[in-house]
């Protein structure tokens, strides 16, 4: 079952580990006899653009080379568009105002986002791009980490399980941050439109009233099954799924910088799960990000090979990346700018070894740059989640560097 498998989410699976062959004592690789040669190939990958691969006398040259290589591998560089904005809805909340906005990501594609603006601002304020999770929940995006009126029960249950019942974007706004919460590609306002799919893919949806919990659950099931088709189509087009996601996140920075409420020198990013994965890449690839928090997605790619890729989404794969940069190497491309990593000891999506190896690599990079205190990694005795104690620690980290 992959990350995002909506029939039984990874959060539910974390509570029933006996379902996994690993827990039952079966120590064979999920790719069986194919594993040894793939492991050997991965182990021979040099990560040649890692800051630790060799001496780099010119840090800025290393940074530029690493970013250029990643953007090449991501294989998605649509023509830039000027920042745009359509305000769809304005809701006044206690202590802040929530706008629902739409802006262009490319000339062919737009997204919706919530923009949370604290009351009483007297000048440009620090800002955070809050990035939603995957969780097998495609019907919503931004709503998974933002308080909304009349939220359906299935959404409230997700927020309780993944976030301890607290929508952290609103908490950031209450504490003085301008917060942008965009829908990622394939989620929320950018989700699949069932009306434009062949009926063979949507028959189950037609059994339920649109917008009901049953309909949303059926939509999530359909979208989960469709990931493979979408991934194949993306690759066949010459692009990559991460490339599309990350370009959208950089477009969100463009939009945020167009807002007069925002101090462009104090922008951070934070997210859980695929949101953490996107946060790691946004921090690493965009020099406009001053501080980052990665929750529930920091590991080494080699550590996933044996038996951990079954549970992951199609949204994370970049061909040939390991020859140049592992995940912690990408996150380090903005070092020594501050980075906090939040890991969970009971997270079945990763191995403790992989999380530890990534932590140690990042710590060594920051140490080598003379800024060890700019990196923090904390572990929580939880399954894959970003609950209130971890949120509070993340906000304290953002406060330390952005206020």
Image (tube, rainbow, N blue to C red):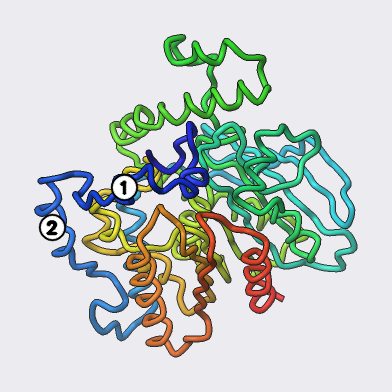
Give the structural element (helix, strand or loop) at label 1: helix
What number is the disc on residue 309? 1
**In the displayed structure image, the side of residue 331 where residue 238 appears, left or right:** left
Q: Quadrant of the N terminus?
A: top left
Tell me the distance, in whole angstroms, between the alpha carbons under discs 2 and 1: 17 Å
Query: Label 2 crowding class (10 Å Cα cut-off): few <14, some 14-19, many 20+?
Result: few
Please state if 245 lies on the left or on the right of 173 as rendered. left
Image coordinates of residue 335 in percent, x first then y, are 45, 76
Residue 322 lies in quadrant: bottom left
Name the residue rendered at 9%, 53% in the picture: 37
| Along the line of sight, the residue nearer the viewer: 295 or 18 | 18
- Report x, y in % for residue 280: 47, 61
Residue at screen point 58% across, 71% down: 290
Expressed as whole percent of the image width and height from the top left, the position of residue 46 reads 18, 67
Q: Is 111 displayed left or right of 367 in the figure?
A: right
Label 1 packing within 10 angstroms: few (<14), some (14-19), many (20+): some
Asked if 138 appears above or below 316 in the picture, the reply is above
Compare marks 2 and 1 and give the one earlier in the sequence. Answer: 2
* 100 relative position to 199: left or right: right
Q: Are marks 2 and 1 in contact (CB under 8 Å)?
A: no
Picture residue at 35% right of the left edge, 34% below the top? 231
Q: Which mark is in front, 2 or 1?
A: 1
Identify the residue at horizontal 32%, vertical 43% (top origin): 310
The C terminus appears in which quarter of the rendering? bottom right
Image height of 71 relative to 188, above or below: below
Q: Position of residue 269 (x, y in %)?
A: 59, 61
Helix, strand or loop at label 2? It is helix
User: Which residue is identified by label 2?
Assistant: 41
Task: Locate residue 125: give its quadrant.
Answer: bottom right
């Amino acid at each position: 079952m992959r990350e995002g498998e909506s029939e039984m989410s990874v959060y539910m699976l974390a509570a029933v580990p006996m379902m996994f062959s690993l827990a039952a004592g079966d120590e064979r690789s999920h790719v069986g006899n194919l594993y040894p040669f793939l492991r050997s190939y991965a182990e021979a990958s040099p990560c040649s653009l890692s800051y630790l691969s060799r001496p780099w006398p010119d840090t800025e040259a290393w940074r530029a080379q690493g970013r250029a290589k990643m953007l090449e591998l991501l294989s998605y560089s649509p023509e830039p568009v000027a920042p745009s904005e359509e305000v769809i809805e304005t809701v006044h909340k206690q202590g802040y105002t929530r706008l629902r906005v739409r802006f262009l990501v490319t000339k062919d594609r737009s997204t919706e986002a919530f923009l949370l603006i604290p009351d009483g601002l007297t000048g440009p304020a620090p800002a955070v791009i809050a990035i939603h999770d995957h969780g097998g929940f495609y019907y919503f995006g931004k709503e998974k980490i933002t308080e909304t009126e009349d939220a359906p029960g299935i959404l409230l249950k997700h927020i309780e399980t993944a976030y301890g019942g607290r929508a952290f974007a609103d908490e950031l706004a209450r504490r003085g941050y301008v917060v942008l919460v965009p829908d990622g590609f394939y989620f929320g306002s950018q989700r699949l439109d069932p009306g434009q799919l062949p009926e063979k893919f949507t028959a189950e949806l037609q059994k339920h009233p649109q917008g009901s919990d049953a309909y949303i659950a059926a939509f999530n099931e359909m979208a989960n099954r469709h990931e493979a088709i979408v991934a194949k189509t993306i690759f066949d087009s010459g692009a990559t799924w991460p490339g599309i996601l990350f370009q959208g996140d950089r477009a969100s920075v463009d939009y945020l910088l167009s807002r007069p409420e925002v101090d462009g020198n104090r922008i951070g990013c934070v997210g859980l799960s695929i949101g953490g994965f996107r946060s790691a890449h946004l921090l690493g690839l965009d020099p406009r990000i001053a501080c980052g928090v990665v929750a529930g997605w920091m590991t080494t790619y080699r550590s996933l090979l044996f038996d951990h890729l079954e549970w992951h989404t199609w949204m994370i794969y970049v061909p040939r990346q390991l020859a140049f940069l592992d995940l912690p190497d990408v996150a380090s491309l903005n070092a020594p700018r501050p980075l906090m990593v939040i890991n969970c000891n009971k997270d079945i999506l990763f191995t403790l070894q992989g999380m530890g190896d990534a932590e140690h690599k990042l710590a060594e990079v920051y140490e080598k740059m003379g800024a060890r205190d700019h990196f923090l990694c904390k572990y929580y005795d939880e399954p894959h989640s970003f609950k209130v104690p971890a949120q509070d620690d993340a906000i304290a980290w953002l406060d330390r560097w952005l206020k």
